[in-house]
Image (tube, rainbow, N blue to C red):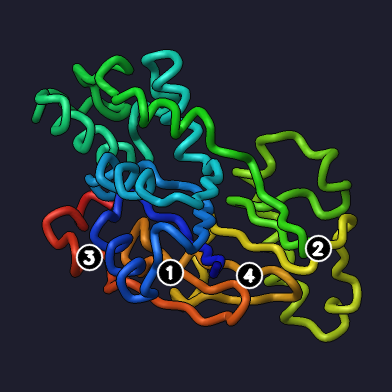
Amino acid sequence: MRTLVIGDIHGGYKALLQCLERSDFDYKNDRLIQLGDIADGYPEVYEVVEELLKIENLIAIKGNHDDWFAEFIRTDFHPFYWTYGGKGTLISYLNKCGKTGRYFATGSGYKTSLVSGDIPQAHMDFFQNQTLYYIDNKKRCFLHAGFKRDLGFNSQKMEEYFWNRDLWSDALKYSSNAELKKEFNIATKFKEIYIGHTRTPKDKPLKLFNIINIDTGAGHAGKLTIMDINKKVFWQSDPLPELYPENFRDQ
C-alpha cells in the first residue's frame, strides 16, 4: 500500500481528478491523507466530496474552511456569510439540490436559500467527522495548518491545528538565516510534519527543517499537489485558472 498526501483542494474537482490520475492512485489499495480545506473556492465542492468518498483508505483532516462549512451544517449559519471563497461551496450545493441561482450578494457576503437540510447526509457526516490531525506509526504528523511549537502537541487548543500559521512562518524566517537555524526547535519531536493552509512561494512543495508544505495554491491561481510520502515523488494538476477559466475571477 502506498500512502499519498494531497493539499488544499478548495472545490477544484478537475484538479483532484488530474492528481489522482497522474499519480496512478489505487482507490482500493492506496491510502490518501487529505490535509483539509475541501470547501470554498471553486464551485465543485460537492463533486470533490463524492470522489473522496470512493476512496477506501481515506484520512480526511479538517481545514478552517471545512470548519466553517461544518458550522453551517450544524446551525444553518455560515460564520463569515460565505465571504472567504464560500461562493464556490454555495453554488455547488445549490446546483445539486435544484436551487440553482438562489443567492444574491450583500455587503457582507451572500444571502441564500440553501439550508443545512439540503446537504446530503453522507456529506454532513463527512464534514462533521474530519479529524484534527493524524500521526502515523513512524511519527509523521499530518494536519491542516500548524501549532505552537513551544507547547507540547497535545496541549494545543484545537483551533491551532487548522488555523496556526506561526509554525510555517517561523520555519521560513529561521531557515533564511544561518544563525537562527540553530534556534529552531519544536517541543514535540516528529520525524516529519505535513501541512497545507499557507501557500508555498513558487507553487511547489517546500520542505523547511522537517516541515513539508504542500499547499501549492489550488484555492487561487496555483496547482493542486499530491505526494507519495515515502518516495517524496509528487504530481500536480494544471493551474486552476486553466481548469476553471470562467470562475477564476471569483477567487
| Residue 194 appears left or right of 152 | left
Please tell me whether mark 3 or mark 1 is closer to you in this view. Answer: 1
Placement of 67 over or under 30, stated as above or below: above
Which callout, 2 or 3, points at the residue further toward the start of the chain?
2
- Amino acid type, mark 2: Phe
- Amino acid type, mark 1: Thr
Label of residue 241 in the image: 3
Label of residue 190 in the image: 2
Report helix, strand or loop for mark 1.
Answer: strand
Residue 222 visible in rendering: no
Q: Nearer the viewer, residue 220 or 12?
A: 12
| Residue 142 appears left or right of 2 | right
Crowding at dot 1, Cα within 10 Å, few <14 / some 14-19 / many 20+, comes out as: many
List the residue tagged with mark 1: 225
Quote the CA–CA distance across marks 3 and 1.
15 Å
- Amino acid type, mark 3: Pro
Looking at the image, do the residues carrying marks 3 and 1 touch, with CB atoms under 8 Å apart? Answer: no
Q: Which of the 4 image quadrants contains residue 92?
A: top left
Quote the CA–CA distance across marks 2 and 3.
36 Å
- Amino acid type, mark 4: Ile
Please tell me whether mark 2 or mark 3 is closer to you in this view. Answer: 2
| Residue 220 appears left or right of 36 | left
| Residue 34 percent across, percent down from the top left | 50, 54
Placement of 193 over or under 98, stated as above or below: below
